[in-house]
Amino acid sequence: MSGILIVAEHEGGSFKKSATELLGKATQLAAALGTSVSAVVLGDAPAADLGKYGATTVYQVGGDFSSYDPAAMTDALAAAIAQAQPDVVLAPASYAGKDAIPRLAARLDTGMATECTDLRAEGGAVVGRRPLFAGKLYGDVKISGKPAIFTVRANSFSQPAAGGGAASVVAVAAEAKALTKVLERKAPSSTVADLTEADRIVSGGRSLKTAGDFDAVIRPLAASIGATVGASRAAVDAGMAHHNEQVGQTGKTVNPTLYIAMGISGAIQHLAGMRTSKVIVAVNKDPEAPIFEHATYGLVADLFEVAPKLQAAFEKALS
Amino acid sequence: MKVGLCAKVTADTDARLKASADGSSFEVNGKVVVGPYDAFAVEEAIKTKEKFKCEVVSFTVGGGDDVVAQLRGTVLALGADKAVVVSDPALAGTDSLGVARTLAAAIKKEGCDVVFCGKQAIDDDNVQVPAMVAELLGWAQVSRIVELEIEGTDFKATRSMDGGVREVVAGSLPAVFTAERGLNTPRYPKLPAVIAAKKKPLETPDLAALGLSGGDVAAKAVTTAYGAPPERPKGRKLEGDVDTMVSELVRLLREEVKVL
């Protein structure tokens, strides 16, 4: 093995959680495989700091990457990989990870596995375990090309403790040619996390009946614990919630610590999008609702009765 | 202007999946459909055809009678002028890169200027093929678009990124776009169009017809050990009246699972 290279994403010089999460996992894998860990950073960021989380070398590609283009990112990563010659590349399954990394795999004529939820060392190689059909099925992916590329779903691995010293930084020159130009960036005005990154989610389903109910019951309950609002397909189709808020196979796949399902029956396509939540709370009048088979805690009750009481209890508990 | 679109026929969202006992394969129980995100791509291709009065060709890799029936009943019935379904025994075990190489060769042969895809299929969830096609063709790509304007050979697209961020990006054709929910509202095919679609051309070239060999599509990523999702620890239903259940729930969230 000539090492595991992780793609360390940063925003304006601050490394994202995924960078340290990947370094933590890469360090474990490298120990099992008897190899070392390096990282690649595009643009200006404190590259040497990644040594604290196990990177021995950081390949820093010079240039301005603050504006994203998948072709330019591919050029930059390919240049770093040509220098680092890793056997394995790990990248976050972020927007760029899903957009540019397949382009990179095609450039390098190698195989990749998308959005793995587990990685392990086996037979001198890394094997990725990943969900298919939005998590209704899982499979192991083995890669025969070099490097073997894996993208990893956020929050799949624990954050490592900081230790160790500074990494040595190798400057990489790349001719990164963007094929598109960003004209405008619109960040959401909300301070609440996006569904795919949320740690807490409160979702509403068909039982809400109207958009007015949804707004009066689900949104304040979510706000009481700083949770992001989600919705079932039935709720979105009925116009109660925005399609951006849909959780499920044809909406967002979420992975929060706490998922509260209010009046959601638990159709297979909804379960597919949220079954990896660490704790699931279900409130539904129907004791036979399939959601109860997956709920950590189930409340067979009318959500309209539960929601205000739960909200008051949350507010009291967090005050 | 010639518009291409990539359409994959997959199991519908209510399908049930079951891995074989040895994990080497899996069974799909349910009907097949053109993927829901591909449906947005089809609609965008038809809208582009209406604007530019041009031809639309759909591309699919592999497929039997059910795939052909779906393509005729939706993609061709909605307005695509021709479907290309690449069929070759060597494609049976291929991976995303093999599929992308096949699609890129077929797209190049047709001489398309723009290609629409769904942001992902809803079976293997690889989210790889469109970006790989763009790379193999040397084209620009914009993924997860929710708005698109094409003027001449210039485009302006809005993409939906992580954290609710949206970016407006500009570039020039040729390009690959992947469709996110919200890009448009797919129309339904009308019966006369469904009947007429039965007579539209549907080609089934093999790899050799596209200048490719079996070796070009040999898989570098192989999936094995199919199995059910990891088991969730058994949960429980809380007892008592609503007040009791609510206070017990908050206690459990704080003290047992420590998430509050």
Image (spheres, coloured by chain):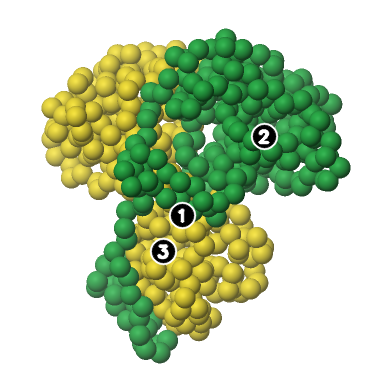
Chain colours: A yellow, B green
Q: Quadrant of residue B23?
A: top left
Q: Secondary structure at mark 2?
A: helix
Q: Are marks 2 and 3 on the same chain?
A: no
Q: Secondary structure at mark 1?
A: helix
> What chain does mark 1 sit on?
A
Estimate how packed mark 3 is, as few (under 14), some (14 to 19) or many (20 or more) residues with alpha carbons within 10 Å. many
Q: Marks 1 and 3: which is nearer the front?
A: 1
Let me know if residue A127 appears in the view. Answer: yes
Q: Marks 2 and 3: which is nearer the front?
A: 2
Residue marked by disc 2: B68
Could you say where residue B59 lies in the image, as x and y percent from the top left? 64, 27
**Chain-order first, disc 1 or disc 3:** 3
Using the image, tell me which numbered label, if any, was put on residue A272. Answer: 1
Q: Secondary structure at mark 3?
A: strand
Q: Is residue B252 above or below residue A196?
A: below
From the viewer's side, name the closer residue of A4 and B103. Answer: B103
> What chain does mark 3 sit on?
A
| x 66%, y 13%: residue | B109
Q: Are marks 1 and 3 on the same chain?
A: yes
| x 37%, y 35%: residue | B223
Could you say where residue B12 lies in the image, as x and y percent from the top left? 57, 49
User: Which part of the image, by quadrant, shows the C terminus of chain A?
Assistant: bottom left
| x 48%, y 27%: residue | B92
Say if mark 2 contacts mark 3, CB within 8 Å: no
Q: Is residue A78 above or below residue B64?
A: above
Residue marked by disc 3: A259
